[in-house]
Amino acid sequence: MGRIEKPWGYEEQVLCSEVEVGGERGILGIRKLVINSDEMTSYAVHERQADIVYLEEGSAILRLEGKLEDLDKGEAKVISPGERHQIQNIDSQVAEILEISFPYRPEDIERIEDPYSEER
């Protein structure tokens, strides 16, 4: 569906489909995040979107509301709307993560800290 290059690696759209969940109609988005060694996503928050992150390969840490949690291979964590979050690869190999979002809206993101912004 398309690869989007990111400063930390890349993102691939796996699925984007309209569904109904709990009486709410919206877009279900599934993306594969490939995070390079020692890189991280921005520390961000979604107003309405909930995410499930699932570590397929590698080693990563989830920063959730300022606390660090290990993400183990084969483990999923839920990120509720309004929770600040960031994923960091802590391995020498790439980390591959499935991110399942509902209701997925790419514009529903506020970046709180961006390690790749030009204002560093």
Image (spheres, rainbow, N blue to C red):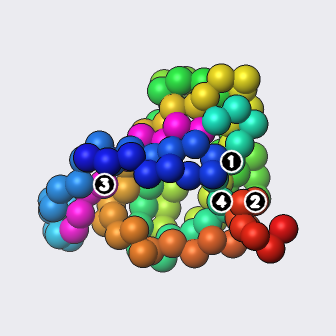
Compute the Cα span from label 3 to label 4. Answer: 19 Å
Q: Is residue 13 left or right of residue 97?
A: left
Q: Which mark is residue 115?
A: 2
Q: Are marks 2 and 4 in contact (CB under 8 Å)?
A: yes
Please state which of the two labelled residues, at mark 1 or mark 3, is closer to the viewer: 1
Compute the Cα span from label 3 to label 2. Answer: 25 Å
Please, what is the three-letter code of the amino acid marked with disc 2? Pro
Report if residue 57 lies within the magenta region.
no
Please, what is the three-letter code of the amino acid marked with disc 1? Met
Q: Are marks 4 and 1 in contact (CB under 8 Å)?
A: yes
Q: Which mark is residue 42?
A: 4
Instruction: Please tell me how many numbered marks the rendered image carries.
Output: 4
- Residue 57 visible to the viewer: yes
Q: Secondary structure at mark 3?
A: strand
Please, what is the three-letter code of the amino acid marked with disc 3? Gly
Instruction: Give neighbour class at mark 3: few <14, some 14-19, many 20+ (Cα, 10 Å).
Output: many
Q: Which residue is mark 1?
A: 40
Viewer-nearest residue: 114 or 5: 5
Viewer-nearest residue: 2 or 75: 2
The picture quadrant where one finds residue 19 is bottom left
Please, what is the three-letter code of the amino acid marked with disc 4? Ser
Q: Secondary structure at mark 1?
A: loop
Compute the Cα span from label 1 to label 3. Answer: 21 Å
Query: Which stretch appears magenta?
Result: 26-35
